[in-house]
Image (tube, grey):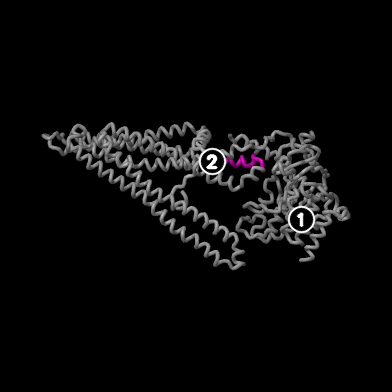
Amino acid sequence: MSENINKDLDTDQIQKDNIQGGDAFGEMVFQKPKSFWGGMSALLKYLKPWRWIIILSVLLTVIGTVMTIIAPNYVRNLTDEIFAMVTPPDLGGRPVHDAMESVKQAAIVLIVLYAISFVVSYLQAFLMAGVAANSTKKMRTDISVKINRVPLGYFDKVGFGDVLSRTTNDISTIGQSLNDGLVPTITSFVLIVGLIIVMFFTSWQMALITVATVPVSFILIGVVMGMSQKYQKLQRDYLGQLNSQIEENYSGQSVVLAYRGQKKALTNFEKVNAPLAVTAKKAEFLSGLMFPLMSFVGNIGVVAVLVGGVLLYTNGVFEEAGAGIIPQFLIYSRLFMMPFGQLAQGLGLLQSGAAGSERVFEFLNEKEQPWDVDKPTLQTIKGDPNYKVKGDVRFENVKFGYDPEHPVIKNLTEEFRSGQKIAIVGPTGAGKTTIINLLMRFYEPQSGSIYIDGVHSDEMPRAYVRGLFGMVLQDTWLFEGTIKENMIYAKENVTDEQVIEACKAVNIHHFIMTLEGGYDFKLTDDVNISVGQRQLLTIARAMVQDNPILILDEATSNVDTRTEQHIQDAMDKVSKGRTSFVIAHRLSTIKNADRILVLRDGDVIESGSHDELIQQNGFYEELYNSQFADENAE
């Protein structure tokens, strides 16, 4: 047992060393952060280990963009040389041989420029893909570690689903923003600025013609986006309603069938599905209209550049520049329309990345439980490495409330000896499970102390204290794996004989042997094993763990009376020499308990054996008789 605990502590230390501070229908949906710069600042700090790779990637992006901007100038030279070849010498033409040499040189330069642009773009994409993959991998690792560090009370305020969403959706969004948002945004910005400078430097007249189409495209796109967003919002609203209905109908299928509600369920489904189809069609149409519109405006720009260039050339404006300036600006006009859409999408992705970053780092910056891995174990405190934990437990003036203003346990002072079977009973909300939570140090009391074998539990590591307890809950938990793997779980050096013995003790061995593969049978969500059989497996697992203290929280609530008797017999055997805490609503199962604590409103109002409490004619006797009265009435 001590070896397992030490192993857990080593793993905990490793975790400490590791931790550091489009929707379904095609249109990209961006999540808005509370503070864009706050989210991006936190993300950039987190990316510090990859800063040189990011800087190199940005430099490569700038180089590739510059190559793209320079290339049309050589297209212009190439066109001029071709034009000179076909022009008669008396009109300024050049010999074919001389012109061909210039054509070859211009073509070679163009090929080299486009090759460099391709290589640097490939390297940039490769580097940023590595940064995105490695950083998101580290984020998921850090969140996984953090989950084990935050107090359990954190999940009283924030749902597990929310943390899961941060681990999956938000981190995926961050990775996408790094891959498809950061570099494209920089590329688009550099390309726009660079093209404007080069175009106006080359010919301000042609530059004005090229730029003139931009406001037209923005106006058209703005109008279409305004109409599209209206239907996209309706579509998402209807889709949410539809998903909610489907989830309810599928999860409650037996209720729908039992009450013959199929027709009503189908009617309700159609009420949402029909408008969803209409809004989805309109949203898809308007979203699909964006690119044709941009293409149309781009083609108009090409015509404007071509016509304007010819008119300017025939009027002698480009007499010195040559006719090659026209194809040069045709390429510029095409290049100039591209980055605006990329810039909008890139900024949207960065905005979503900043929002995801806020949520991820909000969780990573949550207050952790105090670090206690270096605290001594009972063996160290007792000065005996072979010390065997007895299981003596003492509560001394313990007060606790999930909300400190409303205590659940008001002033608990009780002492339990090794080998005792202690039952805890009382109405719902009396504090039964809370006592177990305090024992396991899932929560820390607001005041008072809990002692194990005379040592304050706070003086020992949490992982060590929890390793002293075996636990069986009302809600069964089995992971996907073989039955044997589920039985052993985190314990090492467990023999097959120990597993079989534990399963025989709870009368589940025969059932296991009827399964294909026996103890090597793989459990999955699809495997049809009853709730009671799952409960028996969890009880057998607690026996295999062989802890000095046992906790049974309604452990027999999901089994029949005969099986319950078998489990009681097995528990009596395994509880010998161990302290056992049993929470039970079925009072007949705890008649043989050494002590029964009766809780009401956070106080122990009665304590003693079953016979002693019955003789007191108090609250326990009332609970016991009312339960049997209910059973007889049935």
Question: Which quarter of the figure has residue 622?
Answer: bottom right
Mark 2 or 1, nearer chain start: 2
- Left or right of 37 in this view: 434: right
Hey, what amino acid is under mark 1? His
Taking depth in this image into account, of 281 and 10 the one nearest to the observer is: 281
The residue under label 2 is: 137
- Left or right of 307 in this view: 623: right
> In what quadrant of the picture does the N terminus appear?
top right
Q: CA distance from mark 2 to mark 1?
A: 45 Å
**Marks 2 and 1 in Cβ contact (< 8 Å):** no
Against 202, residue 516 (above or below) is below
The residue under label 1 is: 585
Report the magenta residues as a range.
141-151
Hey, what amino acid is under mark 2? Lys
Label 2 neighbourhood size at 10 Å, few (<14), some (14-19), many (20+)?
few
Q: Nearer the viewer, mark 2 or mark 1?
A: 1
As drawn, which residue projects farthest toward the left? 90
Q: How far across and how far down the image is residue 203, in percent?
A: 25, 33
Q: Is residue 376 magenta?
A: no
Q: How far across and how far down the image is residue 378, in percent?
A: 77, 37
Q: Is residue 521 visible?
A: yes
Against 522, residue 338 (above or below) is above
